[in-house]
Image: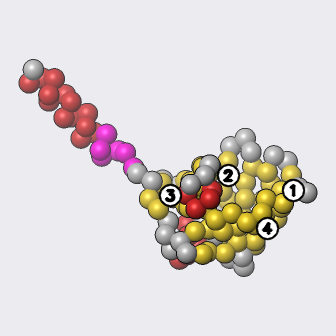
Amino acid sequence: MFKIIANTLFLVALSAGTAQAWERVSTEAAFRALVVGHRQVVDGSGYIEVRADGSVRGQWNGAPVVGSWVWSDGYYCRNLRIGSTETGTNCQRIDSESGQIRATNDRGQGRSTTARIE
């Protein structure tokens, strides 16, 4: 019994030391430091680049991406055109973890996309 408990405690300690939790990006300054000027790459789909001047550029499923963004009330709000399709404005909750970001649509209530920051 002692051996089982010891092994369990060891595994818990090991996983606690290596696991990283997603952290909310809650300020524009933190968002800019993490994302602006870097590509956010979604394997198999494409990438976007969020720029300091408020523009967004990239490529998604072979189509060009153009648009604009602002930081509003703790959310990244962007309006994009992918090819000829307008996405409309969507404010996203941004979380980060080890060189990745997770953007969740509809102020954190919708679909999430995870991207690698390059």
Closer to the camera, 41 or 86? Answer: 86
Disc ID at residue 67: 4
The answer to whether 91 is drawn above or below residue 22 in the figure is below
- Circles 3 and 1, Cβ within 8 Å, touching? The answer is no
Task: State left or right for residue 117 relative to residue 81.
Answer: left
Q: Nearer the viewer, mark 4 or mark 3?
A: 4
Kind of residue at disc 4: Gly
| Mark 2 closeness class: few <14, some 14–19, many ≥20 residues within 10 Å | many
Which residues fall within the magenta stretch? 15-20
Q: Position of residue 71 (x, y in %)?
A: 61, 74
CA gap, disc 2 to disc 3? 14 Å
**The N terminus lies in quadrant:** top left
CA gap, disc 3 to disc 1? 28 Å
Q: Nearer the viewer, mark 3 or mark 1?
A: 1
Q: Which residue is most to the left?
A: 2
- Is 9 magenta? The answer is no
Kind of residue at disc 2: Val
Earlier residue among tags 1 and 2: 2
Residue that label 2 marks: 41
The answer to whether 11 is drawn above or below residue 79 in the figure is above
Disc ID at residue 29: none
Kind of residue at disc 1: Thr
Task: State left or right for residue 50 relative to residue 81.
Answer: left
Q: Helix, strand or loop at disc 4?
A: strand
Closer to the camera, 86 or 98? Answer: 86
Q: Helix, strand or loop at disc 3?
A: strand
Q: Nearer the viewer, mark 4 or mark 1?
A: 1
Q: Quadrant of residue 77?
A: bottom right
Per the picture, the main secondary structure of the magenta-coloured stretch is helix
CA gap, disc 1 to disc 2? 20 Å
Residue that label 1 marks: 85
Q: Nearer the viewer, mark 1 or mark 2?
A: 1
